[in-house]
Amino acid sequence: MSDLIDKIVRSKRRTLALVITKEAALEVRAPLNISLERIRKFVDKKRSWIEKKKDIVNKSRVLPKRFIDGEEFVFEGNLYKLQSSDCEDIEISNVLHLPKKFLPQAKRHLTFWYKDKALGKIIERINYYAAITQLQYNGVKITNAERSWGSCSTKGSINISWRLIMAPPSILDYVIVHELVHLVERNHSKSFWDRLQKILPDYKENESWLKKNGNTLVL
Ligand SMILES: [Zn+2]
């Protein structure tokens, strides 16, 4: 087998196809009776394309957190090194202090802490923008979503992902304003974007930041 191939998936298909998975592995989709040699030749011909693709995936890949001292965590757009400490509760200063007693369940405790910080900040910012835009919302809930950053129900309740507390503050503001505008403009019509732009003239930068970096907002 070519040294590049991680997996071959055979099925009733007629052509060969190459898939780079999100783990940066090469999966070859192949017809049932094509020889290994032909697969290998095909892959070798595409070597430079495969290597380039793998490189891109690897660079954008977010490695699972290990919750060890010195590991970096992001909060409101800034990086903090984790430091296990003798403190009673999680604290943030120039580093992120994690009580040693929380270490066995570090992810659970940190998630809880992030959610708590997110809720406070979201309520503060949503009230700020509701006041200046005169848009009335009925309630706010935080969600766990990793892609659907915000949503707005027909009853006027707004949902925002707690993960946005990791992003720079302007990103959270953008998602909040986006959902507030949906209270009066349900669809992504021209008048929706016009209205949004009047409140946040640079909203496009925030949107592309989210597209590019949204996958990093995980614990
Ligand atoms: Zn929308």
Image: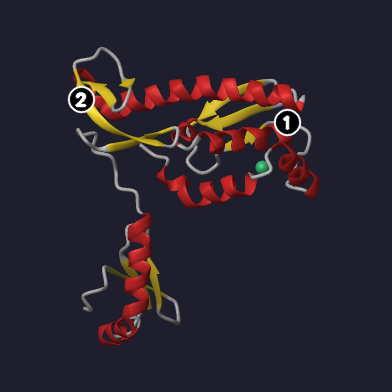
Quarter of the view holding residue 70: top left
Quarter of the view holding residue 49: bottom left
Q: Is ligand 1 within 8 Å of the beta carbon of the residue shown at mark 1?
A: no
| 171, above or below 30, in the image | above
- Looking at the image, residue 120 sits to the left or right of residue 59; the answer is right
Residue 30, x across and y down, in percent: 37, 77
Label for residue 78? none
The quarter of the image holding the N terminus is bottom left
* Tag count: 2
Residue farthest front in this picture: 94
Q: Residue at x 66, y 33 (%)?
A: 152
Characterize the local packing of mark 1: few (<14), some (14-19) or many (20 or more) Cα atoms within 10 angstroms. few
| 129, above or below 206, in the image | above
Label for residue 154? 1
Q: Amino acid at mark 2?
A: Ser
Q: Which residue is mark 2?
A: 84
